[in-house]
Image (cartoon, rainbow, N blue to C red):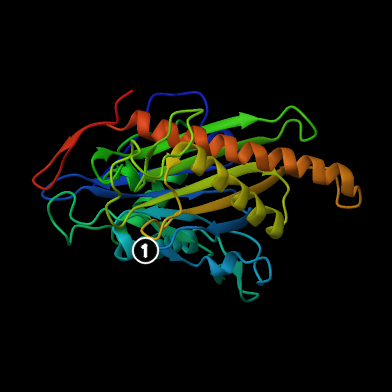
Amino acid sequence: MTTSQAPDRPGSLSDVPGVRVGHVQRTDEGWLTGVTVVLPPPGTVGGVDVRGGGPGTHETDALDPRTLVPTVDAVVLAGGSAYGLVAAHGAQRWCAEHGRGFPVSATPGEVVPIVPAAAIFDLGRGGRFDARPDEEMGYAAAAAADAAGDGAAVARGNVGAGTGAAIAGQTHKGGVGTASVRLTGVGGDVVVAALAVVNASGAPRPRGVAPQVEGGRAPAAAPFNTTIAVVATSADLDPAEASRTATAAHSGMARALDPVHTLTDGDTVFTLATGSTPLPPPADRRARVLALVELQAAAAHVLELAIRDGVAQATAVRTAAVDLPVWPG
């Protein structure tokens, strides 16, 4: 099990102040999988939108705007399909040890961390079906995120949850990508960023090319794939606005991949809003709506960039089970 660092690159999830990312992965002895933990600052509001027909998720109901707790303490992205969701327990344990969570009594430290998670299907890609993330990998990835510090470089490619990722009918490598933008309009000084684990049934879509349903360039989709992502922003969103931003971000997934949201995908987008940059107040309804529209359009754009980055940063892999090249171009 290793932790990963990368040379500094412009545009990543950590460009949102206070958001940290940690990766842990294994590639030895039949392993090809890992865990990525996104650790936001305390008080970060969360949202989610699940569009795929085969999702592997944990605690997404806690992000419903109608529920009690509006904040998120960590987000876990993992390999291992539904088995890998146990990594969230490790990240939750790390959060609890550090006093991060929803207080449930007057006694300091008695908290329940809110740690939603999503997993990709990578079972058996390293050779062993039982080689999948466990609770300790989730704990280690949370610790790695904390140790990275604010503004640290985020490793890309075949790291963390993207270690065993594959795309285009499992014929080419996928991976982790990330990107960020800074808004210049109504929501000036707002940072919007994304991190994506690209493990899609579909193939990358060239910019400006319409989807091709029959006779298309994408190989026939193999079962059990997923693209999962975190969109983070410095804006002060409420839970409903955060979830709507996750919904809008899915458009970026559709721009970058063809097809998406199929019965065999588990496509899921989380939104994290740290609240360090105020938008126009709710009382100024028109101005706030304009700012939200700008932010949600940026969320779709930056997720597209992150997905394309994940494909571009992937590296060819050869194991006893798979021999996958990178996507051409």
Q: Is residue 291 left or right of residue 67?
A: right
Q: Is residue 43 visible?
A: no
> Which amino acid, by three-letter code, is at mark 1?
Leu
The quarter of the rendered structure image containing the C terminus is: top left
**Secondary structure under badge 1?**
helix
Q: Quarter-wise, where is residue 263 in the image?
A: bottom left
Q: Quarter-wise, where is residue 106 in the image?
A: bottom right
Question: At which x and y percent is residue 34?
Answer: 30, 49
Residue farthest to the front?
A: 214
Query: Who is closer to the viewer here, 4 or 107?
Result: 4
Residue farthest to the right?
A: 283
Residue at the image point whose x is 36% and y is 47% from the top: 200
Looking at the image, is 137 positioned above or below residue 21?
below
Q: Identify residue for label 1.
A: 85
Query: Who is closer to the viewer here, 166 or 113?
Result: 166
Looking at the image, is 77 positioned above or below residue 16?
below
Query: Who is closer to the viewer here, 267 or 84?
Result: 267
Q: Residues within 10 Å of mark 1 (few under 14, many from 20)?
A: many
Question: At which x and y percent is residue 276?
Answer: 71, 42
Q: Is residue 182 left or right of residue 197?
A: right
Residue at the image point whose x is 61% and y is 40% from the top: 299
Q: Is residue 224 visible?
A: yes
Question: At which x and y percent is residue 169?
Answer: 28, 46
Number of numbered discs: 1
Looking at the image, is 310 positioned above or below residue 220?
above
Residue farthest to the bottom?
A: 105
Question: At which x and y percent is residue 232?
Answer: 59, 44
Looking at the image, is 118 positioned above or below residue 14?
below
